[in-house]
Amino acid sequence: MSTDMALWQEIVLAVFLVTAGIFGLVGSFGLIKLPDPMTRLHAPTKATTLGVGGVLIASMLYFFFAKGHLSFHELMITLFLFLTAPITAHFLAKANLHTNVARDEVPPPTGDRPWAGFESDEARRIAEEQASKGA
Amino acid sequence: MIGRILPHPLLTLTLVVVWQMLVNYVSLGTLVFGLILGIVIPLITAPYWPDRPRLKNPAMIVEFILVVLWDIVVANIVVAKTILFTRNTAMHPAWVSIPLDLRTPEAITVLAGTITMTPGTVSSDVAADGRSLLVHCLDAPDPDAVRDEIKQRYERRLKEIFE
């Protein structure tokens, strides 16, 4: 690490890095410890928020302290993570709903039509025809 | 006239800012190239957003982001505690059905993404008619409380932003 940083600056960076490491570790541990696919899915959403967030804040502070300029790449990484992480989580959850969960295991939605993953193609075609007639 | 060159001023602004951040420094050259991208991309992609929502209350976006960031930090600590100190048999994983007041697809997408990014809840499915979200909670002894909190903290603010 560069030598032109003050001690307190290195301590601040270390705190962020260690915190991020701990949350990443707990997230990975959860992946082993939790009992079924749906609860295990909660572990990676943790690791990508505070775990990666802490590293990115530390990286921004490092460039500000050591090089004296602001770095914006970290904000971009945050943005792209927040755009992509929910989509992969949604894919995994839907795949799990399809293969491992029965329709009566989940609470029903409020409207007349079922959850999108549980509606058959035939039921969807009829419902959409009715909707277009009504409109 | 300005509407024909800049059909989507917010997208133009976003593209210019994102380009500056990707290049990681500001100069006249990067600014001009960012502007070119910011003008050309909205023109080319215009057919893909025929019914784009209008932002009713942009100031609310800042409040929404701050609330979500704060909740992410708090929820991270709560979930870390759950993983480390709660036995698997003592956990209460639960499915929660959340009735939606939002109707804009974009707003529902943002809500679903927010629910997933706050640790402890993952949005798993949407009703075929788009009027409910299926959310899975890691540890929710009281599923109704989770539903009310999501509606109160996120959906209410998104409704002010989009509708």
Image (cartoon, helix red, strand yellow):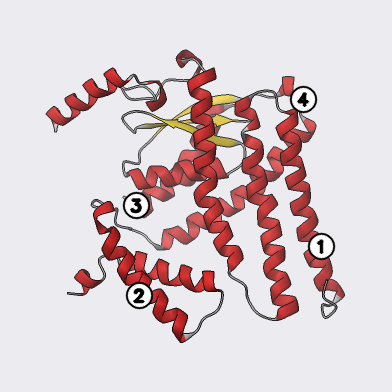
Q: 10 Å neighbourhood of mark 2: few (<14), some, or many (≥20)?
A: some
Q: Amino acid at mark 3?
A: Phe
* 3D distance between C-alphas at marks 3 and 1: 40 Å
Cβ–Cβ below 8 Å for labels 1 and 2? no
**Left or right: A3 in relation to B26:** right
Q: Is disc 3 in contact with disc 2, using a CB cutoff of under 8 Å?
A: no
Locate residue B91, reporting x and y percent: 69, 24
Identify the image quadrant of residue A43. top right
Image coordinates of residue A115 in percent, x first then y, are 39, 25
Can residue A73 be seen here?
yes
A96 w.r.t. A73: above or below: above
Front label number (1 vs 4): 1
Q: Residue furthest bottom?
A: B28
- Towards the viewer: A33 or B114: A33
Q: Are marks 4 and 3 on the same chain?
A: yes
Q: Mark 1 vs mark 2: tell me if same chain.
A: no
Q: Residues within 10 Å of mark 3 (few under 14, many from 20)?
A: many
Among the two numbered marks 4 and 2 on one chain, the one whose residue lies closer to the N terminus:
2
- Crowd rating for badge 4 (residues with CA inside 10 Å; few <14, some 14–19, many 20+): few
Query: Amino acid type of disc 2?
Result: Ile
Q: Disc 4 designates what residue?
A: B87
Give the secondary structure at mark 1: helix
Mark 3 or mark 2, which is nearer to you?
A: 2
Q: In the drawing, does residue A5 fall left or right of residue A24?
A: right
